[in-house]
Image: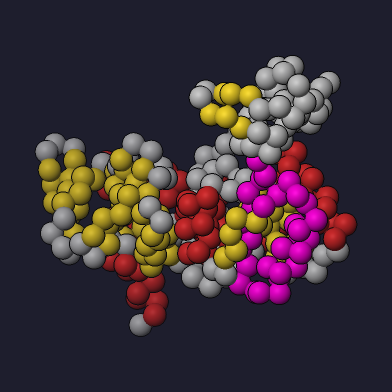
């Protein structure tokens, strides 16, 4: 009977109870099927089945920009603003805590930029970049953003972006490395690593060496190690080959940390670092190391 109480798994719920109501007043679990007709949550031949709102996180260092997005989203009852963040650190923390469906993300921000945020969060949210700079558009779509809003933008443009994002929800999650790819002209000057809700920033000049550990890399800096979900080949593509050399399939070294090379066995060698760390050097790695060291010495001579 419409509006009647029913009992589900030992829990009594009324018309305004936990499981919501379809058009007949029967209860259905949000986001699942209507028990009355068996169709998925949404419009069915009986009526509308309630579903939980989409969770959105707004990330922008400008209060006015966050307020504008919040105002536009207020017209959408199906979307709930779960968090607002003024910098990249806050964004990483919010994404870990509330697992958003939608992420409105600025590019240039204090502490971490938008692309570094994408490196650090779990894949899943539909990402809409919101920025005043058009030069990041290609990189944003390479990182599989669903849209790119260039400030200032009208409400109509926002509506199109939101509909596009909602249509993309539930697509196959992409590997984290996609977000970290950069052209050679935009090589990073630091690496970022997430540890729970904490973020470690490692300036490249302080990176001693990196070691492969399956689909992770262990970044070694100042006697400490940081584990990052990234392949060593992807890390190599980000680094300046004039400063960092792949000396082995499992190791990349900072040239400035190499103290000497020692023979080890018939066809292999060891790189001895300034902190006495010993790293394997393959035959091809040795050739790359010699070439890089010669180039480095040549550049020093040119500056004298």
Residue 196 location, x and y as percent? 38, 52
Residue 298 falls left or right of residue 8: left
- Residue 30, visible in the rendered structure: no
Marks counted in the figure total: 0
> Which residue sits at x=13%, y=47%?
263
Q: Is residue 207 visible?
A: yes
11, above or below 286, in the image: above
| Residue 274 % position (x, y) | 17, 64
Residue plotted at (77% across, 44% down): 164
* Left or right position of 199 against 102: left
The image's colouring method is secondary structure
- Looking at the image, is 133 positioned above or below residue 118? below
- Asked if residue 272 lies left or right of residue 251, the reply is left
* Relative image position of residue 243 (x, y in whole percent): 37, 62
Instruction: Pick the quarter of the image with the N terminus.
Output: top right
Task: Pick the residue in front: 217 or 56.
Answer: 56
Q: Which stretch is magenta?
A: 51-80
Task: State the residue at coordinates (39%, 80%).
Answer: 303
Say which quarter of the image contains residue 70: bottom right
Figure quadrant of residue 215 = top left
Q: Taking 176 as reference, is 148 above or below it?
A: below
168 left or right of 152 in image: left
Task: Decide which of 251, 214 is in the foreground and name it.
Answer: 214
Indicate yes or no whether the magenta region holds residue 69.
yes
* Image quarter of the C terminus: bottom left
* Identity of the residue drawn at 63% across and 60% down: 58
Residue 7, x across and y down, in percent: 59, 23
Residue that extends furthest to the top in the rendered view of this protein: 37
Tell me if residue 248 is in the magenta stretch.
no
Q: From what the image shows, is residue 163 above or below residue 292?
A: above
């Amino acid at each position: 009977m419409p509006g009647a109480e029913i009992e589900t798994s030992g829990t009594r719920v009324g018309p305004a109870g936990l499981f919501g109501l379809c058009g007949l007043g029967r209860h259905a679990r949000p986001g699942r099927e209507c028990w009355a007709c068996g169709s998925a949550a949404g419009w069915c031949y009986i009526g509308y089945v309630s579903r939980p709102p989409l969770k959105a996180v707004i990330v922008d260092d400008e209060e006015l920009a966050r307020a504008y997005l919040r105002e536009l989203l207020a017209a959408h009852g199906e979307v709930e603003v779960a968090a607002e963040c003024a910098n990249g650190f806050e964004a990483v923390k919010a994404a870990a805590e509330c697992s958003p469906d939608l992420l409105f993300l600025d590019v240039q921000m204090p502490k971490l930029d938008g692309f570094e945020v994408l490196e650090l969060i779990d894949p899943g949210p539909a990402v809409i970049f919101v920025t005043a700079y058009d030069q990041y558009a290609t990189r944003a779509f390479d990182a599989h953003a669903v849209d790119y809003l260039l400030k200032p933008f009208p409400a109509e443009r926002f509506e199109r972006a939101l509909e596009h994002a909602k249509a993309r929800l539930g697509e196959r999650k992409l590997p984290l490395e996609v977000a970290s790819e950069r052209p050679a002209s935009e090589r990073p000057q630091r690496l970022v690593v997430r540890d729970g809700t904490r973020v470690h920033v490692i300036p490249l000049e302080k990176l001693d060496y990196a070691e492969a550990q399956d689909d992770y890399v262990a970044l070694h800096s100042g006697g400490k190690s940081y584990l990052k979900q990234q392949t060593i080949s992807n890390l190599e593509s980000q680094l300046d080959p004039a400063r960092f050399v792949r000396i082995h399939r499992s190791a990349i070294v900072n040239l400035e940390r190499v103290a000497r090379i020692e023979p080890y066995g018939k066809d292999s060698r060891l790189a001895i670092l300034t902190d006495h760390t010993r790293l394997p050097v393959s035959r091809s790695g040795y050739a790359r190391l010699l070439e890089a060291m010669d180039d480095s010495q040549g550049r020093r001579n040119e500056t004298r």
